[in-house]
Image (spheres, rainbow, N blue to C red):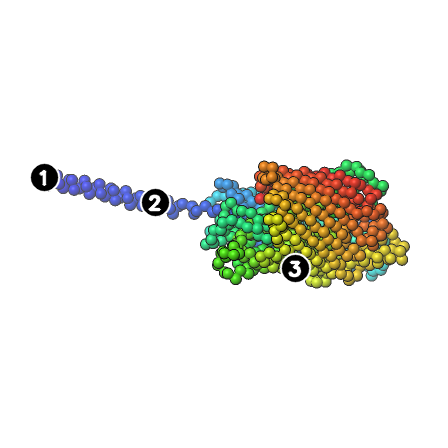
Amino acid sequence: MKAFRRSCALALCERSSLRALGFFCALLASAARAADAPPPIFNWVGMYLGGSFGAGVPLHSGERLQATSGFGSPAFDLYPPSVTRPGVAVGAQVGYNWQQGPWVWGFETDLSLLDGRRSPNGLFAATPAYAPGLPFYTLSANSSANFFASIRGRVGYAYDRALIYLTGGVAAGGARGPATLALGPGGPDAIFTAPWSQSSRMKYIVGAGFEYAFADQWSARAEYFFLSQSLNTQTFDNGAGFLYASRIRNENHLLRFGLNYHFGAKNEIPGSLQYGQHSNGGNGGNGGQDENHGAPEQYSVHAQTTNVVQAYPRFRALYDGPNSFPSGGKANVGSTTNIFLGLRLWEGGAAYLNPEIDMGYGLANSVGAAAYVNSAVSKVGRAAPYMRFQRYFLRQIIGLDSGGERQRDPDEGSRSEVLESVQNQISGKVDKDRIIITLGKFAVGDVFDDNIYAHDPTTGFLNFAFNTLGPFDYAADSWGYTHGLAVEWKQNWWTARGGVFQLSTIPNGLDIEPVLFRQFMGIAELEARYELLGQPGAIKFLAYSDNGYLSKMDDVINYAYLSGEFPPVVDSVRKRSVKMGGGINIKQQVIQNLGFFLRAGMCDGRYETVDYTDVDRQISAGLVAAGQLWGRDDDEIGVAAALGGLHGSRVRFFGLGGTSVYIGDGALSYAGEKNLEAYYKLGFGKNMDATFDYQLLVNPAHNSARGPINVFGLRLRAAF
């Protein structure tokens, strides 16, 4: 019996030991699996911001000034010593990623200093073979654009926390600055000057990289690029028919290392309240509702591409001139692609960046009518795509609600509203009464002369006459942007706005005046909101003055008669002047989904056009109907008409054959310009649409000897 009990006890002990051993082994196996398991997979979705450092190695270092017009022999060529060398590359980047399984794709834009590409400067000995035995020559060059910028697509494969990717896109930069060449000791015909170098070819960048997420919101990367900043041509001219041409192939190998901070896929301020319905932001965005949430965003990412094709058939014309629509008919295609990035910096403050890729041409290369037919694409046309940073600015919103956290007042209703997440605006709750300060590079029309029914040529009317006051000769470079400061004071039923902006260096120039207040525009606008017969409306009064070096048209004409030089040249007698103007802007809802707009304005037509278009007085009006009226929620229809005219001195100037920004037929039978536009926008959801557009131009360029012109257009737009 004892033996039986002893055997049973031993068996039980063995079973217990086996169970304990099995449990212990299971624990060890579990610990081993945990130790060997990879860390949590990194989520690459969302916006990121970072910096980079590396080096660039140029592929071509030769230098040659090729003798062209007037010389007739390569014996006159000059070979300055090359100063091109490897250099440092340092910069910053921002981008956005999407992810599906292991596949990651997105876009990135960056701006980097690229040292190493310099223009030769100094006194150099000529080659012994130089034809006239030139002993030496002097080159003096201004600063070059030793940088590169890009908008690139990215696609990659993620494994655990590692990402391998390919990237490529459109680049910018690499141009040479203005320069002077002096042959020997100099002389009237021995001094050659050259403007900025030009390139008609596409600048591009392609490469690959490896990125590793070493922390929850941080990643490090290494990447290689091939950067082509195209064949840059710089032409030196002595004004006597002799030219030198410098052609530099600007290509580089780049290796750089970077560090990125990832904001993540959840684009909300942690711990913020969830708000309900969105209201009209009153500053650069449309009102509406956000079906997802109303929490304040950390960042804002939007993009759009707009492609416009326009054409017109042959029309009646007694003659064509340098800035005319060709009377035999014409067709052109142009496109603009934008990325809109915004990042909240602190309470009420945000930074915005708007890189853009332009390609193609406006109709007839953006000349032919004062009320020009296409304001959706750049007037600086090129066959190859090119990139620019059109906007970069800071915006601060200061709330004026003395009620603090009080949300609702029995008499006044809600004291706050939620800005919608749209282009160049970050969603979040703000006080209805507020001050908005915008500082940086942006368009004057981003803040002033807005009208919900006629302002955005990517979604509504295309013609100049219906998107801005025609006589509003606002400060801008040739793309429509400038540096400036705008302040808005928004109250219950009114808003006051004021601003100061830099003019271009010369009227309608490519460059913005670099010296503060040497050439600038001051502007003020007062808006009043009201209800008429139960329907909301608003009226705006605007006044501005351009302070810069401008030509008075009577002086230009008098100079032409005194010198005997015809046609008169508008830049012949520029001096410090002030050009003033203003207008009225009305928007009025007629019934729900049907609105009316009217603009009327005039300016001091005694002076030349500064930066906008060639009209001194204009009135325009129209109707816009939303598709909800006929059961097509995403469609829209609009029709509008405009009348414009010129001051007497400008009529005489164009009659003598003068040319300006958009017009100049070589002669003029003056009559006021008349415009009609009608469009139907066919929506394919909220983010895609096709617009069929028709415009009638009567007396184009204020000239009754030409036209009328029938312009047909198709606009295709996609956005997110």
> Can residue 302 be seen here?
yes
* Amino acid at dot 2: Ser
Residue holding disc 3: 498
Q: If you read the primary sequence from the N terminus, does the residue marked by circle 2 or circle 1 appear first? A: 1
Viewer-nearest of discs 3 and 1 = 3
Residue 1 is tagged as 1
Residue under the point 63% across and 45% down: 590
Residue under the point 74% across and 50% down: 618
Query: From the image, which quarter does the N terminus lie in?
Result: top left
Give the side of residue 508 with respect to residue 102, left or right. Answer: right
Mark 2 and mark 1: Cα distance apart in space: 43 Å
Give the percent coordinates (x, y) of residue 551: 80, 58
* Amino acid at dot 3: Gly
Residue placed most toward the observer, 600 or 361: 600
Give the percent coordinates (x, y) of residue 76: 82, 51
Give the percent coordinates (x, y) of residue 15: 22, 41
Give the percent coordinates (x, y) of residue 427: 54, 51
Mark 3 neighbour class, 10 Å CA radius: few under 14, some 14 to 19, many 20 or more = many
Q: Name the element at disc 1.
A: loop
On the image, which quarter does residue 690 sit in?
A: top right
Q: If you read the primary sequence from the N terminus, does the residue marked by circle 2 or circle 3 appear first? A: 2
Q: If you read the primary sequence from the N terminus, does the residue marked by circle 3 or circle 1 appear first? A: 1
On the image, which quarter does residue 609 sit in?
A: bottom right
Query: From the image, which quarter does the C terminus lie in?
Result: top right
Q: Residue furthest front?
A: 533
Residue 30 is tagged as 2
Mark 3 and mark 1: Cα distance apart in space: 108 Å
Residue under the point 82% across and 56% down: 553
Q: Name the element at disc 3.
A: strand
